[in-house]
Image: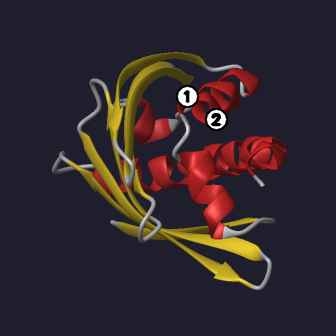
Amino acid sequence: MKHHTQARYPASSDAVIGMFSDRSFHERKMRNLGLDFEILDESGGEDEFRLKTRRAVPVDAKGMAAKFMPSTTQVVNDERWRSSDKTGAVTVEIRGVPLEMHCTARMHDEGSECVIDYDWRIKAKIPVGGGTLEKFVVKDMEKRQAREHEAGIALLDDYR
């Protein structure tokens, strides 16, 4: 399943890529969201930044999706950002769930705002019920993304 989302930040893309390329931003954002998390790996240089985290995520799955999603999942998020062209890539692994999730991201300015386009590819690796699981994950991801977006905006002033 392909899924497109967009996020807008009230700042330039230079400020937003600077924020997304800072480990302390991610740590403060996750703390502010009340997430139990661990930094697994971090790397990067002048132009590239990578942060791999593990989070404990509560899930309220119903019906067919509940057969594959435990009430608390361990999610490994591997995020990469490149400052020179303001692009990113995200791979999400939900431990124990037969699902692949990958995203490419591109930032650009529209007036005084930064717009980020996220293009997701979500693929359940089960023959029956895969579409239902994919749709549940997209709906759940949109709710979480909205909360993370708000938490990011709250920290944006530190990067202007």
Q: Does the image show residue 79?
A: no
The secondary structure type at the circle numbered 2 is helix
Tell me: 18 left or right of 52. Answer: right
Please state which of residues 118 and 95 is positioned toward the viewer in this rendering.
118
Q: Quadrant of the C terminus?
A: bottom right
Q: Where does residue 126 sit, x and y in percent of width and height?
A: 18, 45
Outermost residue to the bottom: 111
Amino acid type, mark 2: Phe
The image's mark for residue 25 is 2
The secondary structure type at the circle numbered 1 is loop
Which of disc 1 and disc 2 is earlier in sequence?
Answer: 2
Residue at the spot 48% in from the left edge and 49% down from the top edge: 136
Outermost residue to the front: 46
Residue at the spot 69% in from the left edge and 21% down from the top edge: 31
Q: Is residue 73 above or below residue 60?
A: above
Instruction: Rate crowding at label 2 as few (under 14), some (14 to 19) or many (20 or more) other CA atoms within 10 Å.
Output: some
How far apart marks 2 and 1 lie (CA) works out to 24 Å
Residue at the spot 59% in from the left edge and 33% down from the top edge: 26
Q: In this figure, which residue is indicated by the disc labeled 1? A: 59
Q: Quadrant of the N terminus?
A: bottom left
Q: Where does residue 36 sit, x and y in percent of width and height?
A: 58, 14
